[in-house]
Amino acid sequence: MSETPAAPQAEEHCWTAITRAIRVTVTPRFLPADSEPAEDRYVFAYTVEIVNEGAETVRLIARHWRITDGRGRTEEVRGPGVVGEQPTLGPGQSFTYTSGAPLPTPSGIMVGDYHMMTDAGQPFDVAIPAFALESPFARRTLH
């Protein structure tokens, strides 16, 4: 019996930033089933893993995103928590969630930060690394 090789999977890239022992890793992907390129609608999902590699318990209070489309237009999004939650992470704990972003262009960039608070009440911001949103419809150029 011979095996048929699996179809190649789209390569996933992840981006990581560490701020004050909080590691944030983002893995974006294009959602072709939710997108309508003929109508300039390109939908992306991104999965975020937040890991507390420090010794303090922290709570994610709020988020701030800057979403820039392929034409350079930027939208800022602010709000409490992530996906309706304000997770508390003890040392060694992690929280993972998936969210999404529609764009009017086939590519873009997202970057942001999380506003966190220690159990002692000290606020601090954690960087969300800049990451690319790329669809197969994005035009690639070499410089």
Image: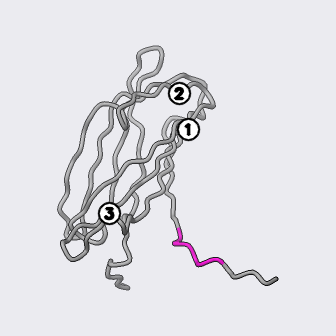
Number of marks: 3
Q: Regarding mark 3 in the picture, which secondary structure is present there? A: helix
Q: From which residue to which does the magenta span run?
A: 6-11
**Residue 112 numbered tag:** none
Q: Quadrant of residue 137?
A: bottom left
Q: Which residue is mark 2?
A: 89
Is residue 10 located in the magenta-colored stretch of the structure?
Answer: yes
Rendered residue at 51%/35% (across/down): 20
Q: Which residue is mark 3?
A: 34
32 with respect to 8 (left or right): left
Residue 58 in the image: above or below residue 64: above
Q: Amino acid at mark 3?
A: Asp
Query: Who comes first in sequence, dot 1 or dot 3?
Result: 3
Question: Which one is closest to the eye, mark 2 or mark 3?
Answer: 3
Expressed as whole percent of the image width and height from the top left, the position of residue 61 reads 36, 27
**Residue 51 numbered tag:** 1
Q: Quadrant of residue 54?
A: top right
Within 10 Å of disc 3 (Cα), the crowding (few <14, some 14-19, many 20+) is: few
Rendered residue at 47%/47% (across/down): 48
